Image (cartoon, rainbow, N blue to C red):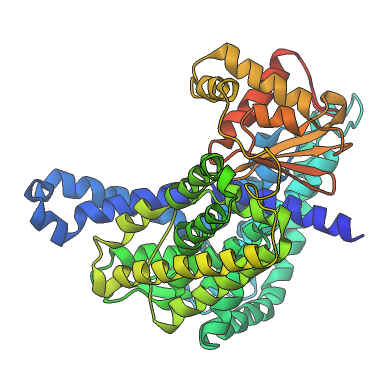
Amino acid sequence: MKEKLISKMQAFSKAIVVPVLYLPAIGLILVICNFITNPTIADALPFLKFGPIQVLFKVLYSGLISVFNNLGPIFAIGVAFGFAKKKKEHAALISFLCLFIFCAIQNAYLTEHNLLHEAVGNGQNMMLGFQIVDMGVFLGILIGCIVGALFNKYYDKDLGEVLSVYGGTKFVFLISIPIMLILAISFVYIWPPIQGVITNIATFISTSGGIGYFTFGFLERLLIPTGLHHILGSSVWYTDLGGVATVAGKQYVGSWAIALAELSDPGTAKLSLYTIFNNVTLCKVFGLTGAGLAMLSCADKSMKNKAKGIYIPAILSSCLAAITEPIEFTFLFVSPLLFLIHSFLTGIFFYLLYFFKITCCTAGGIFETLLYNVPAGIAKTGWPYFIILGLVQMATYFVVFRWFILKFDVKIPGRDGTEDVKLITKKEYISKKETSHENSDNHRYGIGEKIYQAIGGIANIQSIDNCFTRLRVNLNDINNIDEEMLKETGSKGVIKRGSEVQIIYGTNVHKFRDALEEYMEKNNLRIKGEE
């Protein structure tokens, strides 16, 4: 029962990642727009004052910020797409149609019963041109989940020759319509008390001092091995749980949207405390750098040079690209207690961000962090204090990790008495070098073939998906995989949970998924149930 529940939660986590994958890219472009239209920057670089340049980037900013004001439809499409095992594009379209129908029905019901407010606000808002009960992104997630579940069960439903035109994916759409009718009317009455609970939780987080921020930081790291941290992060970054704020006369929901809006608003003197929720970058850039340096310093003298080949790239991946798996999973596998300490320290430094009122807006690695905050100024973001606190965190991690490893003789790579810690061999170098040649069809085909063979072939594969850094495959037998062969493809590690295997590749994981799926397509290898 427990494994089944966790498996369902992981499926949801995996689905919700689909729309989230695009939001950091949008945020980065918004920051660039804000940088170019910033009066202080324009004074320093006069060519930026050129009228068409200012108009172009202001218009682009307005276009992109609207994404954060319309996350409901985006999540409805993305979550259904992520949940669907086959014919994902059909699931996405059906989910959007269902959301549109839900909004139209609820608006008509509110109008019919004189429940429609004269203006938006006070529990009602606009979505897809209809004034409805304000469920925000939760509505999109709910409909995406319902459609995704129905789609996986009935997308290949056969109604016989006479009714064949209504079978398959059309059948999913047809049975979704009465469900939307029931939900649209029900949530007129059900949602207000739910919204009250959400508001109370958000109020608790924002008024409980540093406890709320500590709890978020602690759990966001602790849940990483399960993949469920995506649920926690998304619920705070993109929903009411992360705060609601009015910036320049417009309402923004979720800590990420609030931070981006406040960064570009000249009337905001200092970013709000909600932006602290976005600062997971602190432990990625500084904390894990300290942990990596501690592990390197603890390596046996005879293995020191070899250990550098493992730890230095891992440290740089975390600091520059915010890819934390190589370091985190190194000490997770050899000492889960050390991972618990890591999670606790992350929570402590989230608390310190609150205590010192350091309200940076961060995303990605160190360079993105500077790009987001430096143009906005010290008074608004307090970015130098963020750096200072980060250096303190780095030193703390170094001291704590080094003490723990030496005190309890933790057998991390480099001090485990084996020769497994090694520099990249010539064969591995050639393999990695070939991987970089993305235009090589033969090499891409070979990578896909190796992954396919390593996970047990078509008879073992149930589904294929990915998140930010991991290729996620559901298998009939998770023990029927070749981890050594996966390493040859560039894998940085493997996690097994229930029927799911997560293969860690990094932010270029989509290339490996594409290689696998293209290999299967070229060889006409279809997962059972796929048409």
Please give the name of the residue rendered at 28% of the width and 72% of the height, measured from the top-left corner. Answer: 380
Please give the name of the residue rendered at 22% of the width and 45% of the height, measured from the top-left corner. Answer: 56
Q: Where is residue 18 in the image (x, y as percent from the top left)?
A: 60, 46
Q: Position of residue 79 (x, y in %)?
A: 65, 49
Q: Does the rendering let one see residue 134?
A: no
Camera-side residue of 11 and 164: 11
Camera-side residue of 138 and 409: 409
Residue 372 picture quarter? bottom left
Tell me the quadrant of the picture where the C terminus can be found. Answer: top right
Q: Is residue 97 above or below residue 130?
A: above
Camera-side residue of 248 and 456: 456
Tell me the quadrant of the picture where the N terminus can be found. Answer: bottom right
Q: Position of residue 91 (x, y in %)?
A: 69, 40
Q: Position of residue 264 (x, y in %)?
A: 29, 63
Camera-side residue of 125 and 423: 423
Q: Is residue 17 above or below residue 2?
A: above
Q: Which residue lies furthest to the front in this view?
A: 302
Relative side of 302 to 266, left or right: right
